[in-house]
Image (cartoon, rainbow, N blue to C red):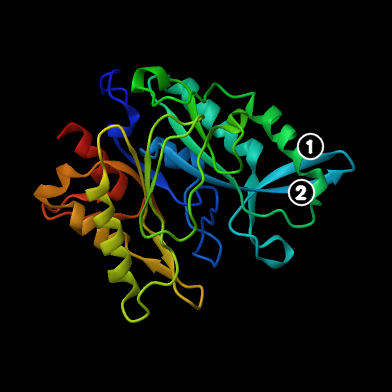
Amino acid sequence: MTALPDDIPISELSIPGTHNSAAINTTRPTLWACQCHSITEQLNRGIRLLDIRLKPKTISQNDVEFKTCHGRLGFFGANEFQSFDEVLEECIQFLKENPGETVIMIVKIDDWRRIRPARHPQILRQLQDVLNRLPLLTVPHLPALGECRGRLYLINRINDDPALGVPLNIPDNTPGASLAPTISRHYPVYVQDQYKALDYRKPEAHKLRLTLGAFNHKSPGAVLLNFASGTKPVFQFVYIMRELFNQLDQPSHLQYSGWLFLDYALTTYTTGHNETLDLPTLFIAANFK
């Protein structure tokens, strides 16, 4: 982003992101892992959009720690990954070393298990205290890139409190939905995030059509959130990264813009020109025509 002009609204950029960014297993794919590279590696290789899911865990009567997770299922902490503090430290360090860049982070609590509802407000206040340590940007208007440089633009999928980021309520399993502006978010959003109930005969082809079709709904001044991840009924991945790479490795790929969430995002493939690239690098190229 350092090479791009300050006056570009961040909605008009092609920004690669990772789905369940902190659900990391560096050795092998698992039921809960979605990535195999650390947050620092993701940022250093072009990822600028992080999808962070949290699980509050009680450590004392009045205190919790926030662990990153994937979903709310999993015995013996199988759905748990690194601490949220570690993720934030990696982001802070990256922005210190790269002040011309920005990181967009979407935060959601996936797992409230073993936390009584009466404690939720207290826990969310603790989360706010954690987030306040960051060089945050949480303005309700759509910022330009220059306003975001060196800062973390925070989006809140937890509730409607702007103190936890710009609020965004995404419908579950949507094949495509337009979200109108609100008091705390002055710009529209289009979301494609159908991850289940895909065509059982050809779920990968179905998910690829949804992902590519969502690009057609990108309009000026609106954010496009486009999730390229899905699952089968038996909890297997619907994995379209190679097929998506092949589609973007076409002359027409320069039309694509928006925010794209990927599984195992840094896997490399061979282009039609015999170059070895990953999907984020290919998607970023659209910003430079």
- Amino acid found under the numbered disc labelled 2: Lys
Q: Nearer the viewer, mark 1 or mark 2?
A: 1
Most distant residue in the right direction:
61
Instruction: From the viewer's side, name the closer residue of 211 and 26.
Output: 211
Q: Secondary structure at mark 2?
A: strand
Please name the residue shown 21% across and 44% down the image: 256
Neighbor class of circle 1 (other Cα within 10 Å; few <14, some 14-19, many 20+) is: some
Q: Residue 187, image x and y in percent?
A: 39, 32
Label 1 and label 2: CA atoms lie apart by 13 Å
For residue 195, what is the image quadrant? Answer: bottom left
The residue singled out by tag 1 in the image is 122
- Amino acid found under the numbered disc labelled 1: Gln
Q: Residue 279, image x and y in percent?
A: 29, 50
Please name the residue shown 34% across and 29% down the image: 10
Number of residue marks: 2
Q: Look at the image and tell me in which quarter the C terminus lies.
A: top left
Q: Look at the image and tell me in which quarter the N terminus lies.
A: top left
Please name the residue shown 34% across and 22% down the image: 144
Q: Is residue 259 left or right of residue 111?
A: left
Please name the residue shown 74% across and 33% down the image: 126
Q: Residue 153, image x and y in percent?
A: 48, 29
Most distant residue in the bottom direction:
201
Against 96, residue 240 (above or below) is below
For residue 246, what is the image quadrant? Answer: bottom left
Q: Secondary structure at mark 1?
A: helix
In the picture, the disc for residue 57 is: 2
Against 183, residue 249 (above or below) is below
Q: Is residue 105 left or right of residue 200?
A: right
Q: Earlier in the sequence, mark 1 or mark 2?
A: 2
Neighbor class of circle 2 (other Cα within 10 Å; few <14, some 14-19, many 20+) is: some
In the picture, the disc for residue 152 is: none
